[in-house]
Amino acid sequence: MKEQEQIRVTAYKASGFAGRYQRLVRDSVIPYQYEVLHDRAGAEKSHVVKNFENAAKALRGEDTGDGFYGMVFQDSDAAKWLEAAAYSLADFPDKELEARADELIAKIAAAQDDDGYLNTRFTIEDRDKRWTNLLEGHEMYCSGHLFEAGAAYYEATGKRELLDVCLKNAEHIYNRFVLDGKEGFPGHPEIELALMKLYRVSGDDRCLALAKHFIDVRGVDRDFYKKERDARSWTVWDNNAEDGDYQQSGRPVREQSEATGHAVRAVYLYTAMADLAAETVDGELAAACERLWENITQKKLYVTGGIGSTVIGEAFSVDNDLPSDTAYCETCASIGLMFFASRMLEARPDGRYADVMEQAFYNTVLAGMALNGKSFFYVNPLECVPGISGKAATHRHTLTTRPGWYACACCPPNAARTIMSIGKYAYGESADTAFCHLFMAGEVSFKNGLRLGCETEYPFEMKVRYSVSGAGRLAVRLPRWSKNTVLTVNGSPAEHTVRDGYAYLTVSEGDRVELTLDESPRLVYAAERIPELSGKACVCRGPLVYCFEGCENGGDVLSLRLTGELSAETTEGVGGFPAMRVKALRSAGSEELYSSVPPTLTETTATAIPYFCRANRGETEMRVWLPAML
Ligand code: FUB
Ligand code: ZN
């Protein structure tokens, strides 16, 4: 029995900043990605739809034509696209999009084996290799993404076809690993968090039991992947089967304290752990989540909300190793961090979680997509120097411009589905309280009958106005970065209590609640224990991290220095998003590689743009952290 009521979402119709982004995804990103998935966009080949068609042929015993192409997890790109389409359809009914989604769903359904198994790679190429390489095979990763799509599509349209495919696939996996007791757990966690969603939508207890099973067995047999490798004669990438830390399976999850290994896998796992801990009231699991959260946010988090600092294995590095120029900071990892934060929040409202969720969204997640929605970053460094970035052997991963698609395309559709479901992160509710976690304009209806209209130009203006319909208890987040925060109801100071970063108040029909946050730009300094950042500062305002690009700074940001005083003013920026002009110094030194002639420093004004707007004007230098002369 659950002791505490989990906080869940609400219906949200976006306007303002979120509305602009959702319009972009609806009008450009979803149609563009649909073309990509059909190999009609002139970008990197996907073949994902063909894979489903060819898998169906394989099942019918027909010639599979051009066979399977892509990553072992290629199927998941289609699932993420469907999930984004589902969220879009929920808010903006669109017959044409629904018809396209239904057609794709029919192709996916046709690729499902009679026993419920569904994976195009193994169905087309290697039926006998099913389930023999959990370490690398990604069968459950693909299933997980399909389950998320199936749940979202059912909720959006009421149509069951994909949901039923998912439930049949989940049953197949449940039978194998729970009923038949086959050993193993997913190499790439994802199915666990997805099973929690499938459980809630379908009410099928086996989904919850299967999620719990995979969480419980992970890391108990530390040699599982080694034994699995020794038993098979094939590999995908020859991954190290003995690196338990990399697989988050070096010990049972309830004993883990340090975020290690592949960053996306880690945060997807922690998301499921946090969800399961709240659902089953598992204090030991919740405590592990809290330790892992602390480790990430105190030792392994970039100011942009990026995580996973090393390209080697797309992984977390050791504590405080946060280089700017070689940062990996995969877009999916920050999306996963948002997931983890939101599940922690659902279990226990604490502004610490929402602060990080917001930091990840407005900075790394949005930077993952160009302002026109048609090209994407996988890797999000905090410094970019053409000639070195994307070029030096150590920097090949830090591309200077966004490609239209990737051979490994996990990030682009992940960004799309996250933006289209941002209401699930922005708002939440418990049995008696409506929560405003992020300040997103629009209309929100809570299940307790309360409705809010939220008007704001946030994150560029710091006033957030809520108009209340109905009555009830409201909790509004008080972000830690805001040093001067004022909360009023109907123009008078609000009667409220503050707990864990939220203001709690009781509101009634017709009330106007207004939150005014600190609008001053601020210099942010890193802890001295981060070697890369000593002596540097960056510019932030509200939740936004700013960066300096060559475009409006004379092509050279490497010689810019910040002073202790910002005296910033707003100016025109990129894509209609305001920039800031800040007081700075320009250093000019000798042309010699090294010289004992000290550089001269001249006062100047530099322009900083929001980090998420970076790299939209061709290849250029970019820096978040500048040396600071204080
Ligand atoms: O392995 C599936 C996805 O591809 C991961 O989440 C990403 O990091 C990329 O490796
Ligand atoms: Zn990714």
Image (spheres, grey):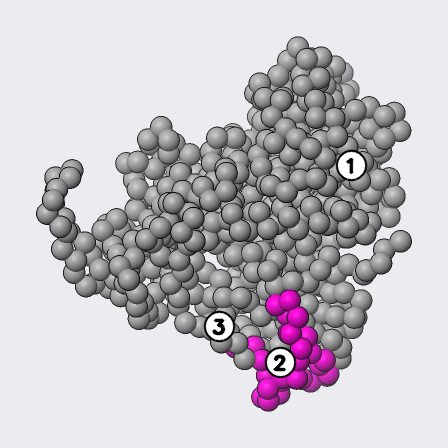
Q: Nearer the viewer, residue 303 or 220?
A: 220
Label 3 within 8 A of ligand 2 by Cβ: no
Q: Please tell me how crowded label 3 is: few (under 14), some (14-19), or many (20+) other residues with Cα within 10 Å.
A: few
- Rendering quarter of residue 255: top right
Residue plotted at (62% across, 87% down):
490
Residue plotted at (68% across, 58% down):
345
Considering the numbered disc 2 on the image, is that residue within a helix, a strand or a loop? strand
Say how many tags the image has. Answer: 3
Residue on which disc 2 sits: 513
User: Upstream in the sequence, badge 3 or badge 2?
Assistant: 3
Q: Is residue 31 visible?
A: no
Residue 10 relative to residue 308: left or right: right
Residue 164 relative to residue 249: left or right: right
Is 411 one of the magenta-colored residues?
no
Region rendered in magenta = 487-516
Q: Amino acid at mark 3?
A: Lys
Q: Position of residue 370 (x, y in %)?
A: 45, 49
Q: Nearer the viewer, residue 105 or 318?
A: 318
**Numbered label attached to residue 483:** 3
Label 1 within 8 A of ligand 1 by Cβ: no
User: Label 1 vs label 2: CA separation?
Assistant: 45 Å
Q: Position of residue 266 (x, y in %)?
A: 62, 39
